[in-house]
Amino acid sequence: MIYYVCKYTPVELFAGFKEECTVLDDMPDNFDLSDRIAHPNLCGFGKSVIQSAISKNIDKLVLVNCCDTMRRVYDIIKDNGTCSFLYLIDLPHKFGCCQRKNFAESLMNLKSAYEKYTGKQFDCDAFKTAFSPLEKSSGPYVGILGARAGREMEAMIKKYMPYPVRNLTCIGNRSLSMDMDALKNASDEKQMFMIYADALLSQIPCCRMNDTLARRRLYTDPNLRGVIYHTIKFCDYYGFEYSEIKDKLTMPILKLETDYTRQSEGQLQTRIQAFCETLSGLENKRVKKISPIKKHFVAGIDSGSASTDVVILDDSKNIISSVIIPTGGGAQSSAKKSLDEALFRAGIDRSSISRIVTTGYGRAYISDKDKSITEISCHAKGAHHLNPAVRTIIDIGGQDSKVIRIDETGAVRNFVMNDKCAAGTGRFLEMMARALGISLDEMSTLGLKWKEDIVITSMCTVFAESEVVSLIAQNKAVPDIIHGLNNSVAAKVSTFVNRLGLMGDFMMTGGVAKNMGVVRALEDKLGIKLYICKEA
């Protein structure tokens, strides 16, 4: 089996040797193997290739020098001695007569190298019959665009989307428009490989090519209903394209940034499910019928990282009971404990509850439920219920921060979330309070009494804590340090708001909404007034 990673790889060539090829697109759990032999600043995809090559004991691997990362990956794997056949194809970044000629020579060099490695003769007839006609798809679909998406991410997206999903990233959009008559009638091998090189280079270009205008075909298809745009940390190519197209697209678009591992699957799943709910519309989903004979109640359970919250409503949508307890001992036990307490406060028993919906990071682990919905959609419905004028929600919880744009019906129109970093979250403030030796309640108001405008330069939780310790050693006043921390959180969250744009009335939710210092800093930073309800 020959593994490859790039759509410009001439996989049909290996049919001439009666060899099978397969894409190397695993998203590993971590980079424990690659980090031992690769530079830490190598991009996540490059590390994943090294990780897979070593862990799978891959014997044959063909790479393409589309970027500096792939050149480094080739050097590292070659030095490691993992593969008996390792080849790096020289790919031109332009599409012209000279480039086609040079690429054709690269393909012939690969053929010769494999002949030498195996001792096999290249079969031209087998090569010519390896090309498949292009498949034509019709009907609405959701497209995955941007940097390549591993099979695990693609499977997760397909699991939740209301439309068929097409992977239009790198390998996913590999399609050769081959002139079969010209190929069959080629006078010699040189002409045959010129035709082949032309077909390979005529594909929809990847972002590493000099001319990427033809990529517009990926997002101008009238059947495209939504875009999930994937970027890899520290890879600017697709980040630039996303910045260019996000304001041009009229359809929903979700940006996912990963380090090309399966870490933070829960957070990715929340974003993907929320995007799915945005596309399909909660109003159109089938709900359990509730008997109109007697007064009924419904309950919502939010299993968050810091707290588990329960709200019980009656059939007139009045809140009759609510409970917030610290999450601990597992989502299931915390949910049961908080629901029992909410039932006790409401003066009703479990049999009176007609429907339970769970949300939050622990929603999937609570068995006593009728349905699970992402906290993105639940936030939208809750904010609209409490204040129908709100169009933008700023939520800062225990381990994430997000900004949600909603319409006049409370439906999600767009949203932005932080990545797996704790910067700008409640956990960040909790750690800073611990470093200062104060409670979160004290932190909430002390920052309003500042005198010196201190700037916290790092948003990384670990580095910011070191910076706070240093400021304490310099005898800086605690209110001034807190004010600097509040401003750093406000700066982080305001970047999310600016991505969506200032629009309509603003509501702030989450535990950090009780921190008046952060609230004031956000209002000053954005030049807006935040509506904060007592149920924040």
Image (cartoon, rainbow, N blue to C red):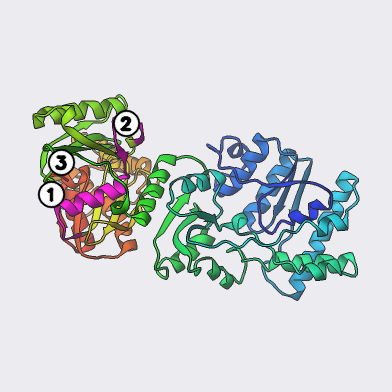
The magenta segment: 364-390
Q: Is residue 492 visible?
A: yes
Q: Is disc 1 placed on a helix, strand or loop?
A: loop
Q: Position of residue 166 (x, y in %)?
A: 53, 56
Q: Earlier in the sequence, mark 1 or mark 2?
A: 2
Q: Earlier in the sequence, mark 3 or mark 1?
A: 3
Q: Quadrant of residue 515?
A: top left
Mark 3, residue position: 292
Residue 342, relative to residue 209: is it above or below?
A: above
Residue 116, relative to residue 361: is it above or below?
A: below
Q: Amino acid at mark 2?
A: Ile
The number of numbered badges drawn on the structure is: 3
Tag in front: 3 or 1: 3
Pick the front one: 259 or 446: 259
The reply to whether the magenta stretch includes residue 522 is no
Pick the front one: 440 or 395: 395
* Residue found at x 28% / y 27%: 328
Q: How many angstroms separate mark 1 from mark 2 (CA)?
A: 28 Å
Q: How many angstroms separate mark 2 from mark 3 (CA)?
A: 27 Å
Q: How many angstroms separate mark 3 from mark 1 (CA)?
A: 31 Å
Q: Amino acid at mark 1?
A: Cys
Which numbered dot is residue 533?
1
Q: Is residue 303 left or right of residue 22?
A: left
Mark 2, residue position: 366
Q: Is residue 469 visible?
A: no
Which numbered dot is residue 507?
none
Q: Is residue 379 left or right of residue 386?
A: right
Q: Earlier in the sequence, mark 2 or mark 3?
A: 3
